[in-house]
Amino acid sequence: MNLTLDQLNTAAPEEALQMLAGIYEHSPWIAEKALAQRPFKSLAALKHAMAQTVREAEPAQQLALIQAHPELAGKLAEQGQLTAESSHEQHTAGLKACSPEELAALQRLNAEYHAKFGWPFILAVRGPRGTGLTRQQIIATFARRLEGHADFERAECLRNIHRIAELRLNDRFGVEPTLGNQVWDCAELLAQHSDVEDALTVTYLTPAHIACQKQLAYWMRDCGFDEVEIDAVGNVVGVYHGTQEEAPRLLTGSHFDTVRNGGKYDGRLGIFVPMVCVRELHRQHKRLPFDIELIAFAEEEGQRYKATFLGSGAVIGHFDPSWLDQRDADGIAMRDAMATAGLDPKRISWMQRHPSRYLGFVEVHIEQGPVLNEIDLPLGVVTSINGSVRMLGEMVGTASHAGTTPMDRRRDAAAAVAELLLYVEKRAAQVPHLVGTVGMLEVPSGSINVVPGRCKFSLDIRATTDEVRDAMVHDVLAEIRAITQRRGLHCRLEETLRAPAAPSAPDWHRRWERAVESLGLPVHRMPSGAGHDAMKLHEVMPQAMLFLRGGNSGISHNPLETITSDDAQLCVEAFQTLLNQLAEERP
Amino acid sequence: MNLTLDQLNTAAPEEALQMLAGIYEHSPWIAEKALAQRPFKSLAALKHAMAQTVREAEPAQQLALIQAHPELAGKLAEQGQLTAESSHEQHTAGLKACSPEELAALQRLNAEYHAKFGWPFILAVRGPRGTGLTRQQIIATFARRLEGHADFERAECLRNIHRIAELRLNDRFGVEPTLGNQVWDCAELLAQHSDVEDALTVTYLTPAHIACQKQLAYWMRDCGFDEVEIDAVGNVVGVYHGTQEEAPRLLTGSHFDTVRNGGKYDGRLGIFVPMVCVRELHRQHKRLPFDIELIAFAEEEGQRYKATFLGSGAVIGHFDPSWLDQRDADGIAMRDAMATAGLDPKRISWMQRHPSRYLGFVEVHIEQGPVLNEIDLPLGVVTSINGSVRMLGEMVGTASHAGTTPMDRRRDAAAAVAELLLYVEKRAAQVPHLVGTVGMLEVPSGSINVVPGRCKFSLDIRATTDEVRDAMVHDVLAEIRAITQRRGLHCRLEETLRAPAAPSAPDWHRRWERAVESLGLPVHRMPSGAGHDAMKLHEVMPQAMLFLRGGNSGISHNPLETITSDDAQLCVEAFQTLLNQLAEERP
């Protein structure tokens, strides 16, 4: 018999505690403390309350919780002394069917890990719907995490414990993230198309890209979109009709191209989530008072050609015809790539949407950062897409002999850049949501015994408002002047990008907030440090974004990019709530 | 009629001032102040006193001195308004025969230079014996210096003014640096042999290297060396017999191989100077009470094979036979290169000298650093060849999105290395003659929008004593631990070299000091930051080195490496004095 939230909310304290027994391994104090927050509005709220309890506990208590877990395929498993839950999970992951070599590898990793960190390695080995990590994946993750820093690894163990607890709660409450699983499956299937064999790379108009287009168009039709077409730049556009033919539409979507060796969710999540919502509406024969127009943008990452935001740019009339003459690394002009794909560049200018025909634009996206992951929240409401400035620089000093040039007679270009880098770090840290990065750093042809005469570097500065960003740029330039003057060097600097900030439209932002609240979750407001298609749409219509937590510390542009289907479920539900709100606003 | 030093020393003040009129352009105050130091022991002492007067002047006075000079091929020259001296110098450099294009280039450079620095470009255009820079060289130097920093360029103008004054004084006193010119000529001639066409590169046993061997052997015989041979590793060894057949010999020499795209004096100066001394002894039919053994070492730089100090190493019995199997970039084994050159590796072990047969080893070398250049002194006495430690490191953090990762959640590997670099700089600056360098620095595959997850770097730490060096290494390692702990990173570090310091033998050091004093010059004691052949000989016998100032801020391992024949003359004279001292010590 499955438990219900109502049962939990109304049970006597002892009884309620029993209902949550074993959710966190050997640690009933977590359930006890979390239950003080009853009644829970949703299962998500319960999960969050329990995770929050662990977050707020003393470090020693957190460590005891980690220590309470068994090793993977360890001695306890051999001796049959695991808890029922652990035993089931390790069995599902096939850990009882390890080959002798795999067992030896796991035992060696267990020993090394324990020697380094002093606690057992913890990994949520189950995936959605009973699927899970393979033994090979488990061993690879183990080896990777063994390389990490203790602080990070302790937090990563706690996050895996919360994920284990989530799966155990799903079992106990008989809950399956059905819609989240649909998102998960779409991501898995679409990721099978790639330009290269053993990594996910889908760049503009390659065969893999066109296969993705076709797949997306097929899915949109299958979900019940009334109109589906591939437009002149290769975007896949689906329209689900509303009841009022002439009413302004809701526009949504994101991109399906990827960076080289990228992740499965960057961009694509923002296509799958509204797709699943429309599938649900269609399944229930529901029509809203407005059309939903979903665009799977063909290009955002700027990987094959130097132009970025090709897809969303074309929709707002910002397609520069000179881009057609750009050539990729193989010398293929964009114009020819488009012809091969059956696209007609002459039709691009006709794609431009008239803003008055739209309510606004919403985009769901994976966070691509660590914040939600670290605060144990699945969703974040975006306040603004940060404005950014990028620069490439070269510090020029004098190369000289590392042995014969006294310290006070050097013009060390690398030391000057080091000073600048630490200034950038310190200056950015003074203002919330301001970030500054020196991502490229190189002494060209540096030698171990030569004082660097040149040092190349990059600067990337982003803030929620252009004013905050420009104030930092101003200070950084002043600091460069001060450093070069003091050290007797000079610095060449070229601004390569200046993108204005795109604050979310307040009413749209509030709709996302209400959607998150309706799930029983606290609202976390955050800026988007990365650029998104919404940034382009921002130029012509109101927009607001919703972020979904990424696993593995929110790593993105990387094969380690991941989400859970439970989080995806919450994301779909938030989108559904947003649609309902809009419908209620338009009688 | 040439002036004599005696005339200058005994003249009435007004008269003496007149004798030095026009040596420094429109600036009689320099002569006036310097003359207060009469009597001068040598012309070098007079030159030094005048340069010192400028050094000690107020910055405004120095600037006025620079401003007093005409532009090269400028308006004054067109209008015939140069001083007699300037007119003669610009004429000698062929500046009056400029093509219209060259004139236009010079005028454009004059304008840009003046706009940037606010004073005229000053370059000593005359070389030894009336030769000088070509118009093309002048234009190239002009363009290069235009790129420099104002502080450096002001100092460089003053140094050129001193050089102009030196040439004018030589004219007035009818002095020609005859022996210095011989050194200069040897350097020019030997530099015609190179492995490559448009740069000076002479690596072990290439055809250019063998041509150098032959040239050196020819010169040694021509200078009057009694025995000249090419030994088993390719060193060229000359012995000039003394009067006492069984007395211990004086050993001297340096290397004739070069780095790729190197300079004409690095190593070679230490061959030419004793060669010229022996030529003079032989010309005067003089024999000393001891033999002089000069070795032109075949290999010091480690360019073709990974072994360094092959030449001096073999002499002290440190030739490792496993080196014979090393292969160069073309796959040619050292053993085969030696066979082709007619060398017999089996004879190498027989080359080992018995220390009891030698008085000691002295080596003359270009400074390869900026110190003597900056203090306007031609010679420096080496106190110690620094001990060094080299390390290669890699800082490992976590790559993450530059836009979405808040400053307080980063594990930026480049920022950690930047901190380390500035620590190394600060720590080394606290102790005289201690140097620390991060010469290699790179974020591998860095992207403008990615927080660096890895950063590679090198460390090079050198000090006059091993204790001082090791104390810094200790502190740097502690700092790395502190940085990695605080920032949550880890650092891989590999020590690639550890060479002990080689302090000069006190009695040999004093002989060099007395030699410098005898020239009327102040003694400047300094460590050698670079390694030299003397470091190897140090392991078996007393040694001491003398440094000669390099031009162009002492740049070395570079085609800009240069000296003047006046400085080379002083170097030969110092070596002669050292020989005389040794002779006097051994009746």
Image: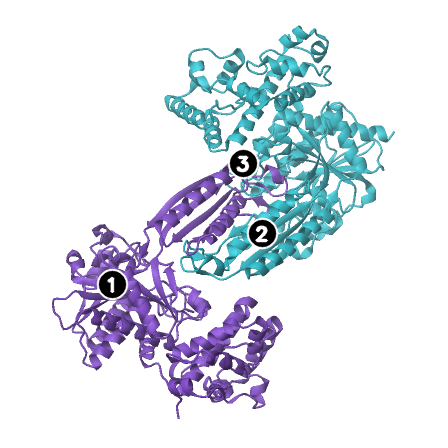
Chain colours: A cyan, B purple
Q: Is the residue marked by circle 1 packed among few (<14), some (14-19), or many (20+) residues within 10 Å? A: many
Left of B213 or right of it: where is A490?
right
In the depicted structure, whether residue B252 falls above or below residue A571 = below
Q: Answer yes or no: do the residues labelled 2 and 1 have beta carbons within 8 Å? A: no
Under mark 2, the amino acid is: Leu
Nearest to the observer: residue B393 or residue A232: B393
Mark 3 to mark 1 CA distance (whole Å): 62 Å
Most distant residue in the left direction: B246
Tell me: residue A137, above or below residue B235: above
Give the x, y percent position of residue B576: 27, 74
Question: Which chain hosts label 2?
Answer: A
Looking at the rendered structure, the kind of residue marked 1 is: Phe
Residue B527 horizontal side relative to residue B446, left or right: left
Host chain of mark 1? B
Tag 3 residue: A559
Badge 3 marks a residue whose secondary structure is loop
Task: Name the chain letter of the residue that bears numbered label 3.
Answer: A
